[in-house]
Each structure stands twice: as structure tokens, then as C-alpha cells.
């Protein structure tokens, strides 16, 4: 039967608080955002300055004397004792800078650097929108729309990366079923497939055009490619240089291979006294220029070949109907278990007069 298409059911909505990266926004540190004329980065705290104004104690080391009453212990020694060595400085220079007034300036510099780093880092976290981790931003992961307030409206949303879909090969497309209703009657208007394909062989040359009915939603380029490849195959009517086939889109063809909906196929076959409605089949409408290929059969195949032999079924369909145009009538299989003749009505049955045969697409199956 036809493939039925079910619209996808929407999945559950994204869980809110439970998803990755949805922590509470980081509070902004004071002074991380400029308001009016207030400086962006505050100066050292008052206690830091007062502490550094008193003479610092001597460096703590193996030979350092304990601090006396004239040199109170440095309450911020843990800050000012950092080894902020400039690159390339030797140990002598470092020792010198860590004693006396040099140490005070080193401490102030360290405190200032610490303050600046804290403000810059905190400011960066606050600007990045708190809840969303940097990793999620870089990956372009979309969040749910329930907490957009935590991000800047001015920042564009990164576009999700498109999945790279590898194009299907000719063989893969020919083995794939396509949706089409068994009772479809489309527009009745035909469009010639543009372009041309030269006849590759020798022998009598047949020129054909391909028309596809508008509104089928099928790949007309694939159909045209299949016709040209199939008819000119060594296993088809072109066998042993007997004849060759050329596709044209303008000028006067010998016949027109037409891909049409079941309803339109029936109309054109009736013009030649043929009824295709009973088994929804194709025909060569001999009283007209059209060889009719039923788009339902092209898209969906038949139970005689089954879904795994769609490629072969489509080749049979082309060879069988063009075979009628070339003057061949129906032939039935006479040997049980043999390949069915290409001119047998294989869409209808592979078991005629209790002689069951195997499906076959070719005039000369062995080549």
C-alpha cells in the first residue's frame, strides 16, 4: 500500500532548571560597570594603603631577625610576600626588591593587579550572561526561551551548525521508495525534462523525450537518468548493438516516455483501449506517442519484487513498456523457478498457470 506520512509529534519541552548551564546569574561586583563619572576600576582599599604606609618588617628568612617594636608585623604579608619576579630577573635583584621600600611598592602592585584581575574576571562572567557557560556558547548550543533575560539583547544568537547530509548515489536513490498515493490524479499537465543524452551505441537509433506530470513531487532528473541508463544497458534492447537510444527535449521524438499519476495514466491508456485501473499498472498507449509509466508503481514498486528489489523493479518497468513500443507482446514463464521474461506482466504476478518464476528486469539477463 502507499506509504503514509505521520507528522512528527512534538517532543517534551526542554526541562527548565534541570538543564546544563542554568545556574543562578553571578552577582555583579561593585564597580564592575561604569555609572556616570564613577571610575570603572576602584583604587586600593584604604586599609591596604594604611598598612603599606608603615615600614614593613625585614624579609622572613633563615637570617632574618624577629620583628622589634619599631617594626610591627605586616598584617598583609601574605599578599606582599608573593614572588612577583619580572621575567629574566636574577635572584639578587629579587632579594633587593623584597626589602625596604621596594617591598611596599611590590605589595601595592600585587594588590592592584589582584583587584584589576578580580574586577575584569567578574565583569566578564557578568557580561557573558551568568547562566550560560562559555563552553555552551562556543558550541552554539541553543537554550530554551524561558530565561532570555540573562543575556544581552544586542548579542546575536549563534546559528546552529547544519548537519552535512551526504548526497545519495544513483543506486541508492533507485533503491529507495518515495511517497505517492495509489489513487492520485495530478494536474494532467506535462513538462519535458530539459537537456539531452546522446545515444552511446550503434544500430538503429531511437529518439525519445521524457515528460513528467506536474505535481507528482518526484525526482524527474532521476527518472530521466534511469531511462537512459536502462535502455542502453547491454542487458536491455540495446544488446549486441541491435539499437541505441537518445534522449532529446526539443524536436520530433519517436515516442515520449511519460511519468504520470495513476489517474492520468488511466486516462492516456484508455485512449488506446487499455484499462490500467484494475491493478494500477502502466501501459504503452500505442494510439498516442506516449509510453505511460504509472508514478505509483515507479515510487512504490510491487509486492512481486518486494521493497528490497525496487531498483530492479524500476528497470523492469522501463524495459517492459518500451518493449511494447518496439513491438513485443506479453510472454509468460514456462519453466518453474526460471527468471521471468521481461515481457511477462510481473507487476501482477510471478505465478502464472501454476508456474512460479523469479523476478527479472532484463531482456538478456546474462548480458
Image (tube, helix red, strand yellow):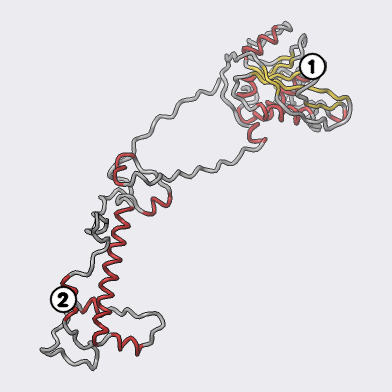
Q: CA distance from mark 2 to mark 1?
A: 107 Å
Q: Residue at x 83, y 33 (%)?
A: 200
- Placement of 280 over or under 205, stated as above or below: above
Assign the C terminus to one quadrant of the image. top right
Numbered circle sitting on residue 50: 2
Which corner quadrant of the image does residue 166 belong to? top right
Q: Residue at x 76, y 29 (%)?
A: 196
- Placement of 24 over or under 51, stated as above or below: above
Question: Does residue 127 appear anywhere in the picture?
Answer: yes
Assign the N terminus to one quadrant of the image. top right
- Placement of 113 over or under 90, stated as above or below: above
Residue farthest left in this picture: 69
Mark 1: which secondary structure?
helix
Locate residue 4 relative to residue 282 in the image: left or right.
left
Numbered circle sitting on residue 232: none
Q: Nearer the viewer, residue 298 or 256?
A: 256
The residue labelled by disc 1 is 325
Q: Residues within 10 Å of mark 2 (few under 14, many from 20)?
A: few
Q: At which x and y percent is residue 338?
A: 75, 26
Locate residue 220 relative to residue 57 in the image: left or right.
right
Mark 2: which secondary structure?
helix
Q: Residue at x 16, y 90 (%)?
A: 66
Q: Residues within 10 Å of mark 1 (few under 14, many from 20)?
A: some
Q: Nearer the viewer, residue 308 or 119?
A: 119
Q: Residue at x 33, y 47 (%)?
A: 152
Q: Nearer the viewer, residue 233 or 24?
A: 24
Q: At which x and y percent is residue 365?
A: 78, 30
Q: At which x and y percent is residue 254?
A: 81, 18
Q: At which x and y percent is residue 186?
A: 60, 15
Amino acid at each position: 500500500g502507499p506509504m503514509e506520512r505521520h507528522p512528527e509529534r512534538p517532543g517534551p519541552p526542554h526541562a527548565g532548571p534541570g538543564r546544563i548551564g542554568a545556574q543562578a546569574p553571578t552577582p555583579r561586583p561593585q564597580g564592575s560597570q561604569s555609572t556616570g563619572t564613577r571610575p570603572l576600576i576602584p583604587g586600593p582599599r584604604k586599609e591596604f594603603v594604611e598598612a603599606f604606609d608603615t615600614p614593613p618588617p625585614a624579609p622572613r628568612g633563615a637570617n632574618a631577625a624577629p620583628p622589634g617594636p619599631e617594626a610591627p608585623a605586616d598584617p598583609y604579608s601574605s599578599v606582599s610576600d608573593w614572588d612577583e619576579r619580572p621575567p629574566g630577573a636574577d635572584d639578587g635583584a629579587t632579594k633587593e626588591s623584597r626589602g625596604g621600600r621596594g617591598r611596599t611598592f611590590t605589595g601595592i602592585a600585587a594588590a592592584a593587579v589582584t583587584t584589576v584581575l578580580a574586577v575584569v574576571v567578574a565583569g566578564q562572567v557578568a557580561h557573558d550572561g551568568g547562566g550560560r557557560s562559555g563552553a555552551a556558547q562556543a558550541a552554539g548550543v541553543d537554550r530554551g526561551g524561558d530565561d532570555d533575560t540573562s543575556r544581552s539583547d544586542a548579542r546575536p544568537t549563534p546559528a546552529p551548525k547544519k548537519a552535512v547530509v551526504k548526497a545519495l548515489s544513483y543506486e541508492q536513490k533507485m533503491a529507495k521508495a518515495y511517497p505517492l498515493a495509489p489513487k492520485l490524479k495530478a494536474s494532467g499537465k506535462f513538462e519535458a525534462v530539459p537537456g539531452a543524452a546522446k545515444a552511446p551505441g550503434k544500430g538503429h537509433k531511437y529518439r525519445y523525450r521524457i515528460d513528467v506530470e506536474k505535481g507528482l513531487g518526484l525526482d524527474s532528473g532521476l527518472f530521466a537518468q534511469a531511462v537512459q541508463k536502462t535502455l542502453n544497458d547491454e542487458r536491455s534492447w540495446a544488446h549486441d548493438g541491435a539499437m541505441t537510444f537518445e534522449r532529446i527535449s526539443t524536436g520530433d521524438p519517436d515516442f515520449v516516455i511519460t511519468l504520470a499519476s495513476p489517474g492520468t495514466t488511466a486516462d492516456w491508456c484508455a485512449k488506446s483501449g487499455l484499462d490500467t485501473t484494475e491493478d494500477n499498472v502502466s501501459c504503452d498507449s500505442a494510439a498516442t506517442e506516449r509510453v505511460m509509466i504509472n508514478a505509483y508503481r515507479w515510487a512504490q514498486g510491487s509486492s512481486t519484487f518486494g521493497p528490497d528489489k525496487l531498483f530492479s523493479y524500476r528497470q523492469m518497468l522501463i524495459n517492459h513498456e518500451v518493449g511494447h513500443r518496439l513491438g513485443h507482446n506479453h510472454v509468460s514463464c514456462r519453466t518453474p523457478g526460471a527468471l521471468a521474461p521481461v515481457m511477462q506482466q510481473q507487476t501482477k504476478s510471478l505465478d502464472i498457470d501454476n508456474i512460479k518464476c523469479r523476478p527479472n528486469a532484463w531482456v538478456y539477463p546474462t548480458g
